[in-house]
């Protein structure tokens, strides 16, 4: 019986040297990259210090990125960031990340070539699964496990079963990978892939650019997935070759690999999707949703904060000549400083500002209800982020609708949930 991507990558990292592993096996593996952020790293560092090894397993493979409450929003967040900075200095970590020089970890690490195809990555953040777009096995773990991985370069895991998702047909206007993954989560629900690997394949996936691929694998955790994959191809190769900081080995699923289920989607019949409160699986086509009045629109996050996402918004503003509705707070936050600079060079900072948006330095901020966009009771927000659970972005009675950047931009212009065609 053939092997899935998850099984192949785990087998290649198995410390026991077994040539093959199968779903359900408990294995200890070597890790290529260990990552944590300003929320999870301080606890991981405590765990690391308790082990007593003194030095991290590899100064080039441990990466600590302040992103969630950075720039520091209060004294507590400042203390957390200082903990990361001091630890990085003490351990002489090769890759230093700081406000003004980095951004959101799931945008920064791929764009700097620090996560590569075939890697096994563990991160102190649930959206570590984003790196599966590169063909890496990447999964989030608790801070104690991250501390152990920083010390030893190893972790243990159960080999996940794999679900396969096939997308075909020509995409309709205003339909992006965000709609593809929302539609998928809507079908299988938020626990439909619990502790499973999700392989995304088919001509509809092959046609996606890297930005859209990251969006898709980013939301694997919203279906309960352990990890997600998009097969390595020429699109991946072109992206990686321009950035890779070390050699890499891509892996490929066997043609006769065993999948617990296979799901197919016809993109020619798909319209923009919206996840309504209060769950990422409460998904409906936008044509079936009441046009709610909107108080805030957030465009950014590790889901849709890349250059190509900002290009969608800029294109809509330039083509229509419109401004954002005066009653809507519009927050546009690039996923990294590199994206910010690209926006600057394109003239989009001026475009977005003149249209009425607050354009910020890179941060996770509003996505987790941290800062720079917290919602009040009964407010409505259209967000390009990944979660809309009750209380996720602020008050528990606020309501968040998840959508692609085009729908978000149209809603910001119209002052209500809107389809881009309305412009």
Image (cartoon, rainbow, N blue to C red):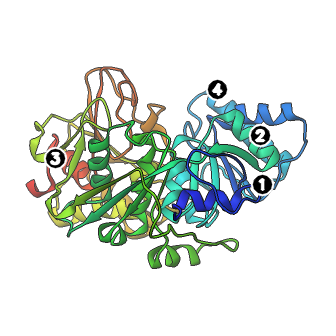
Q: Give the labeled residue for mark 2.
A: 148
The answer to whether residue 90 is left or right of residue 392 is right
Q: Give the labeled residue for mark 4.
A: 76
Q: Is residue 336 visible?
A: no
Q: Residues within 10 Å of mark 3 (few under 14, many from 20)?
A: some
Question: Where residue 174 sits in the image (x, y, percent)?
Answer: 20, 60
The answer to whether residue 192 is left or right of residue 85 is left
Foreground: disc 3 or disc 1: 1
Q: Secondary structure at mark 3?
A: strand
Pointer 3 or 2: first along the chain = 2
Q: Give the labeled residue for mark 3.
A: 285
Q: In the rendered image, which quarter contains the C terminus?
A: bottom left
Q: Give the labeled residue for mark 1.
A: 16
Q: Residues within 10 Å of mark 4 (few under 14, many from 20)?
A: few
Are dots 2 and 4 in contact, CB under 8 Å? no
Are dots 3 and 4 in contact, CB under 8 Å? no
Q: Residues within 10 Å of mark 1 (few under 14, many from 20)?
A: few
Pointer 3 or 4: first along the chain = 4
Foreground: disc 2 or disc 1: 1
């Amino acid at each position: 019986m053939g092997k899935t991507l998850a099984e192949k990558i785990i087998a290649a990292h198995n410390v026991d040297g077994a040539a093959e592993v199968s779903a359900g096996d408990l294995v200890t593996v070597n890790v290529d990259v260990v990552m944590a952020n300003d929320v999870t790293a301080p606890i991981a560092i405590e765990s690391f210090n308790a082990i007593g090894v003194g030095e991290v397993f590899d100064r080039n493979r441990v990466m600590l990125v302040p992103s969630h409450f950075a720039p520091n929003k209060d004294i507590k967040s400042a203390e957390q960031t200082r903990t990361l900075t001091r630890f990085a200095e003490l351990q002489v970590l090769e890759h230093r990340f700081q406000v003004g020089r980095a951004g959101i970890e799931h945008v920064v690490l791929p764009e700097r070539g620090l996560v590569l195809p075939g890697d096994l990555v563990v991160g102190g953040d649930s959206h570590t699964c984003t790196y599966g777009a590169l063909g890496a096995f990447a999964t989030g773990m608790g801070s104690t496990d991250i501390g152990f991985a920083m010390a030893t370069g190893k972790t243990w895991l159960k080999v996940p079963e794999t679900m396969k998702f096939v997308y075909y047909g020509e995409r309709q206007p205003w339909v992006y990978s965000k709609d593809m993954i929302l539609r998928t989560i809507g079908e299988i629900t938020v626990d439909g892939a619990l502790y499973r690997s999700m392989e995304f394949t088919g001509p509809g996936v092959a046609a996606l650019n890297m930005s859209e691929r990251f969006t898709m694998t980013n939301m694997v955790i919203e279906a309960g997935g352990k990890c997600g994959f998009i097969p390595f191809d020429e699109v991946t190769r072109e992206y990686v070759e321009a950035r890779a900081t070390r050699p890499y080995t891509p892996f490929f699923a066997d043609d006769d690999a065993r999948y617990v289920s296979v799901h197919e989607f016809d993109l020619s019949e798909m319209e923009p999707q919206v996840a309504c409160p209060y769950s990422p699986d409460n998904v409906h086509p936008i044509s079936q949703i009441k046009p709610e009045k909107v108080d805030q629109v957030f465009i950014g996050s590790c889901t849709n904060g890349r250059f190509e996402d900002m290009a969608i918004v800029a294109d809509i503003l330039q083509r229509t000549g419109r401004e954002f509705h005066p009653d809507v707070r519009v927050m546009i936050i690039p996923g990294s400083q590199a994206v910010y600079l690209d926006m600057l060079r394109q003239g989009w900072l001026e475009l977005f500002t003149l249209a009425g948006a607050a354009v910020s330095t890179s941060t996770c901020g509003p996505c987790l209800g941290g800062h720079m966009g917290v919602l009040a009771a009964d407010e409505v927000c259209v967000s390009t982020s990944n979660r809309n659970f009750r209380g996720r972005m602020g008050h528990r009675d606020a309501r968040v609708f998840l959508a692609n950047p085009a729908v978000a931009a149209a809603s910001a212009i119209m002052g209500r949930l809107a389809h881009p065609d309305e412009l």
